[in-house]
Amino acid sequence: MSNPRRQARRLAMQGLYQIQITGYESDGVLKQFLSGEYIGNADIPYFKELLMNVDKEESSLLKLVEPFLDRPVREIDPVERAILLIGSYEMVHRLDIPFRVVIAEGIELAKEFGAAESYRYVNSILDALKSYRDSDN
């Protein structure tokens, strides 16, 4: 994986997954990742931004995606949930990243880590969030 931003998203997704499963605090997960051999060529400042801010804003980000879900938030697979949180964060707070990139990166993460068809689900929700960005600009 050569793209530093893509690697940062991948690490953030894994960290958010770990937070969901273990209940650990984001500070501890961040320290664990930074002290391990996970980092590769990741964009470290972007990884930190995603992990810390997505965790901090989880509730508001979930409210943003909730209207587009086909089931209650608590029933969303933790991998899909982490990917949707990252994608919704980027849609709202990183207007410098084109929405097509946000969607494509979410799809790639879902293909790599999610269930067989989860990339379709992630695609449909992130694509629906594009309208949020369109209405704000």
Image (spheres, rainbow, N blue to C red):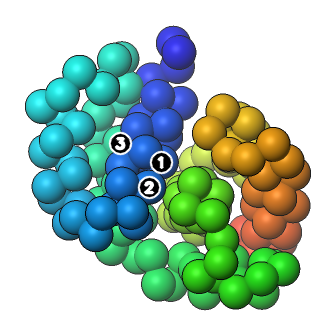
Q: What residue is drawn where x is 36% and y is 29%?
A: 43
Q: Estimate the x, y position of residue 101 in percent, counting from the top left.
A: 71, 40
Kindly identify the amino acid type of the residue bearing the numbered disc 3: Phe
Kindly identify the amino acid type of the residue bearing the numbered disc 1: Met
Left or right: residue 29 versus residue 35 is right
Residue at mark 3 to residue at mark 1: CA–CA distance: 9 Å
Q: Are marks 1 and 2 in contact (CB under 8 Å)?
A: yes
Q: Earlier in the sequence, mark 3 or mark 2?
A: 2
Task: Please give the label number shown on residue 17.
Answer: 2
Quarter of the image where one finds residue 114 = top right
Task: Please give the label number shown on residue 21.
Answer: none
- Which one is in front, 10 or 53? 10
Residue at mark 3 to residue at mark 2: CA–CA distance: 14 Å
Task: Kindly report which numbered mark, 3 or 1, lies closer to the viewer in this rendering.
Answer: 1
Q: What residue is drawn where x is 81% and y is 42%?
A: 116
Residue that protrudes farthest toward the top in the picture? 2
Q: Estimate the x, y position of residue 58 in percent, counting from the top left.
A: 45, 76
- Which one is in front, 124 or 137? 124
